[in-house]
Image: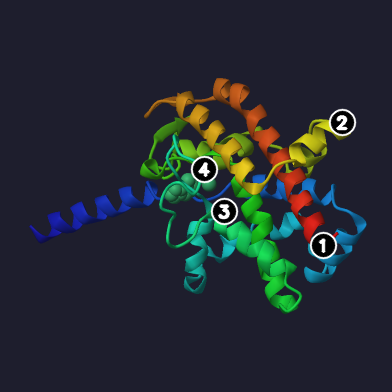
């Protein structure tokens, strides 16, 4: 009887693990956004950032906020990777997550970086976090529904393996495409000055609303248990690439404002 109970427990535990939430664009997505941002920096901002990061690239530091997640001392930053609020409400109309969210996280990073009294070490930390969070903001399901954890609990199949809708948008489509982050960053759409200016316009909250509107559409693209494959990428990967590019352009805009 005891053994049966143990087996039951272990099965439940492993199911729980495989259903566990992912909180991030995969590494490649974040790096693309970092790399594109570095192509849009002013000289002043580039120099200031080079100094703060001791020469590390924005692409390299873009995954730092995920890397520290397994360290308990950084646990409080976990809710900063996403923001969920009802699809019929504006951000702020609903009781915010008391532990913080993506919007509050970005605001904190910007405030620290603008504060002349903050030490270099702390500025470097919040700069790395900011690079990551502006990336997350452009994954539509990071502005998803709370009840399904931004699609993390919507199980689907990706080709022949189990996955979930969130993960498909974080990493499956990007990884299946098989390009490195530099290849993706260097093969981005060629935009006119006017198009870039349009992407740069607006505030963080406008970009949150834009992502939420995309999230509403993303939820319609797949049903629970559905097997997603080439056709899904064919239709949706262009949106992912556009979001990565917007993320890069807007990250540069925010950094140019801080350091420019
Ligand atoms: N956990 C809860 N909501 C989430 C979201 N939108 N994205 C990632 N992880 C989450
Ligand atoms: Zn993240
Ligand atoms: Zn994610």
Q: Which residue is at 48% across, 67% downward?
A: 76
Image disc number at residue 10: none
Identify the residue position indicated by label 1 in the image. 259
Identify the residue position indicated by label 4 in the image. 143
The first of marks 2 and 3 along the sequence is 3
Of residues 66 and 116, which is closer to you in this image?
A: 116
Estimate the spatial distance between the alpha carbons at disc 3 and disc 1, rounded to whole Å.
Answer: 20 Å
Label 1: element kind: helix
Identify the residue position indicated by label 3 in the image. 103
Q: Is residue 7 left or right of residue 13?
A: left
Estimate the spatial distance between the alpha carbons at disc 4 and disc 2, rounded to whole Å.
Answer: 28 Å
The first of marks 4 and 2 along the sequence is 4
The first of marks 4 and 1 along the sequence is 4
Q: Which residue is at 78% across, 50% downward?
A: 252
Q: Is residue 30 visible?
A: yes
Label 4: element kind: helix
Residue 23 in percent (x, y) is at: 51, 51
Identify the residue position indicated by label 2 in the image. 192
The verdict on label 4 being within 8 Å of ligand 1 is: yes
């Amino acid at each position: 009887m005891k053994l049966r109970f143990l087996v039951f427990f272990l099965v439940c535990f492993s199911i729980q693990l495989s259903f566990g939430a992912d909180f991030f664009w995969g590494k490649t997505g974040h790096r693309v956004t970092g790399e594109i941002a570095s192509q849009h920096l002013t000289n002043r901002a580039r120099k200031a950032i080079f100094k703060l990061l001791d020469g590390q690239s924005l692409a390299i530091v873009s995954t730092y906020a995920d890397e520290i997640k397994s360290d308990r001392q950084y646990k409080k930053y976990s809710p900063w990777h996403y923001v969920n609020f009802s699809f019929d409400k504006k951000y702020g109309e609903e009781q915010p997550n008391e532990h913080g969210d993506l919007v509050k996280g970005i605001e904190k990073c910007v405030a620290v970086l603008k504060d002349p009294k903050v030490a270099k070490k702390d500025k470097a930390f919040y700069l790395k976090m900011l690079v990551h969070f502006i990336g997350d903001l452009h994954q539509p399901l990071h502005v998803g529904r709370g009840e399904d954890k931004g699609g993390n609990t919507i199980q689907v199949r990706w080709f022949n393996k189990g996955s979930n809708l969130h993960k498909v948008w974080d990493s499956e489509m990007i990884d299946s495409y098989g390009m490195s982050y530099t290849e993706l960053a260097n093969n981005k759409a060629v935009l006119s000055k006017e198009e870039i200016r349009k992407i740069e316009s607006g505030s963080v909250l406008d970009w949150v609303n834009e992502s939420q509107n995309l999230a509403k559409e993303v939820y319609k693209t797949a049903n629970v248990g559905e097997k997603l494959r080439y056709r899904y990428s064919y239709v949706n990967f262009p949106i992912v690439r556009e979001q990565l590019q917007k993320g890069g352009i807007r990250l540069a805009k925010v950094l140019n404002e801080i350091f420019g």
